Amino acid sequence: MKTRMLWLICCMVALSSQAQTTKRALWVWKDASGVTHYSDKPEPGAKRMEVVGTTPIAPSSPPPPVQATPPAPPPQREYALLEFTAPDKDASFFGPDSEVTVELRSEPGLMGGDELTLYLDGNRVEDSNNAFSYTFRKLARGSHTVNAVIRDADGVEKIRSMSRSFSIQQTTINNPRNVGPSLKPKPTPLPAPAPAPKPPSPGK
C-alpha cells in the first residue's frame, strides 16, 4: 500500500508543470493485523494527513487548421475583334446559282475551348462550326444577313460580329457589272443621197 501511495505522489509531481496544485486530506490507520490503510474518509482511530496533489489543467483547444486559399484562376482572355472581311457590304449577286463566300477574322484567333457559330437570317448554320470561311449555295432571291458569334465551353457569349448584308438578284440581259462601251447600241446609219439626174444626150 505504501508503494502504491509513493507511486501516486510521483505521478502527481511529474504532472505539476501542467497542473494546478491542490491539497487534499488523507486518513491513515492500521488494522489489528498491523496493515496500514489509507482513505479519503475519516475512520475510527485514523490520523489525518495532508497530501499535496495536482488538478490537471484541461489543454486548450488547438487552433482550427488554416485552409489553404486555392490559387486564383488565370485571367480570362477576351476577343478584341470579330468581323466579316467578305463579301462587301450590300454586295449583289445575280442568278439562283450564285455562290456567296463569307470570310471572317478575329483578334486573337479562336482560343481553345471556344466555338465560332455562323448565322444566316437569324438561323444557325449547322455545318459552319469554327469555320472562318463558308460558302452559301442556292440562296433564295432577295436580301440576306449573316452574323457570327464566339462562345466559351459553357455556351456563354464572348463576342458577336456586326451584321453583313448582301442580296441575290434576278439575272438581267445585260449584267450591270459588265456594261461598257462595247455593249452600247450602234447608231442608226444615215440614208444614202439620191443619185443626180443624167444630162440629155446631144442631138436629141
Image (cartoon, rainbow, N blue to C red):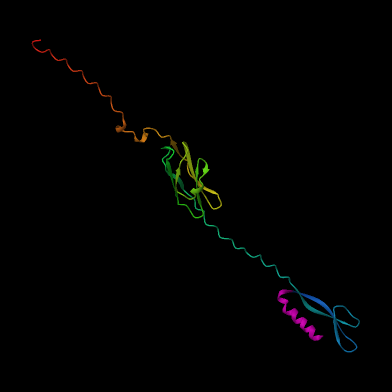
Q: State left or right for residue 115 relative to residue 86.
A: right
Determine the residue positioned at 36% across, 35% down. Answer: 177
Q: Inspect the magenta stretch and tell me whether residue 11 lies in it.
A: yes
- Eyeballing the image, is 88 above or below 183? below
Q: Inspect the magenta stretch and tell me whether residue 32 lies in it.
A: no
Q: Position of residue 99 (x, y in %)?
A: 42, 42
Front residue of 3 and 151: 151
The part of the chain drawn in magenta is 1-19
* Residue farthest along the front direction in this orientation: 204
Q: State left or right for residue 71 relative to residue 162.
A: right
Q: State left or right for residue 187 relative to residue 155.
A: left
Determine the residue positioned at 51% across, 47% down. Answer: 126
- Eyeballing the image, is 41 above or below 143? below
Front residue of 149 and 45: 149
Q: Is the stretch drawn in magenta largely helix, strand or loop?
A: helix
Determine the residue positioned at 52% across, 42% down. Answer: 123
- Eyeballing the image, is 100 above or below 62? above
Front residue of 202 and 38: 202
Quadrant containing the N terminus in the rendered view: bottom right
Q: State left or right for residue 184 relative to residue 63.
A: left
Q: Position of residue 83 (x, y in %)?
A: 45, 45
Q: Position of residue 161 (x, y in %)?
A: 48, 44
Quadrant containing the C terminus in the rendered view: top left
Q: Position of residue 20 (x, y in %)?
A: 74, 73
